[in-house]
Amino acid sequence: MPAKKPIVLAASRNEPELQPASLRDPALVLLSDWRMARYVSMLLCRVQQRLESQIMVNPGIQVLTADSQTRVRNQTVRTLGDPREYVVAREAEVFAMTEALKLQDSIPEVAATSLVGVIAKLEMIVGADRDIGDPTDFPWPHIASVLRDLKAIAGGLPIGGRSREMTRSDVAKHWGAAVKLVAALREEGAAEYRDDVAVS
């Protein structure tokens, strides 16, 4: 059986239109947006974890050398910046994951218009099983089996990608929303504190 030629992915709503018309299946667009949202949430998760590990530096543990305490203290000073940056990163990750979950939740409302679109929907469903407790329970292995069969018959999903500018734009969107949320919560906390002081 000859190898099937990869198809170029349909454009998502954020990208210029690609070819051909059969690839404008709404399920392919949904898959593209869902993958990007998950990728952005993963990037923001890494940022959040880096900042979290910097916060967790423990300057009280002496290691084998005499100057280790000084090195650790210097590292703490160098790595611990504004703690609000960690909070912003955590909230930005939540915003990105929420966007991915909303796209995932819209699978039932999106009608596939091709066999490749059906594969795209199943790909999202199987991809979402990573977020559940036990992906070895019924029906997850069975759905994955159906997906493998469909891919063997119809071919794989189209190849797609997004520019770095689009990725940066999505990260900046979630980061900006997180900055606004953290500032609003901080202001709300300050207002509650002022109200408590005024009452007492």
Image (cartoon, rainbow, N blue to C red):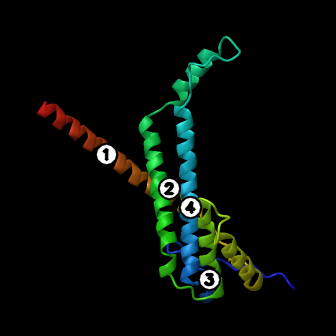
Give the residue pinned by disc 4.
38
Report if the CB atoms under discs 3 and 4 are less than 8 Å apart.
Answer: no
Counting residues from the start of the chain, the first of labels 3 and 4 encountered is 4
Q: Secondary structure at mark 4?
A: helix
* Among numbered discs 2 and 4, the one appearing first in the sequence: 4
* Residue 171: numbered disc: 2
Kind of residue indicated by mark 2: Val
* CA gap, disc 1 and disc 4: 26 Å
Can you tell which of label 1 and label 2 is closer to the viewer?
A: 1
Q: Residues within 10 Å of mark 2 (few under 14, many from 20)?
A: many
Residue 11 visible within the image: no
Quarter in which the C terminus is drawn: top left
In three-dimensional space, the C-alpha distance between marks 3 and 4, rounded to whole angstroms, equals 20 Å
Disc 2 from disc 4: Cα separation: 11 Å
Query: What is the x, y in percent for residue 145?
Result: 72, 75
Residue marked by disc 1: 185
Residue at image point 62% right, 88% down = 114
Disc 3 designates what residue? 118
The image quarter in which residue 85 lies:
top left
Q: Position of residue 169 (x, y in %)?
A: 49, 59
Nearer the N terminus, badge 1 or badge 4? 4
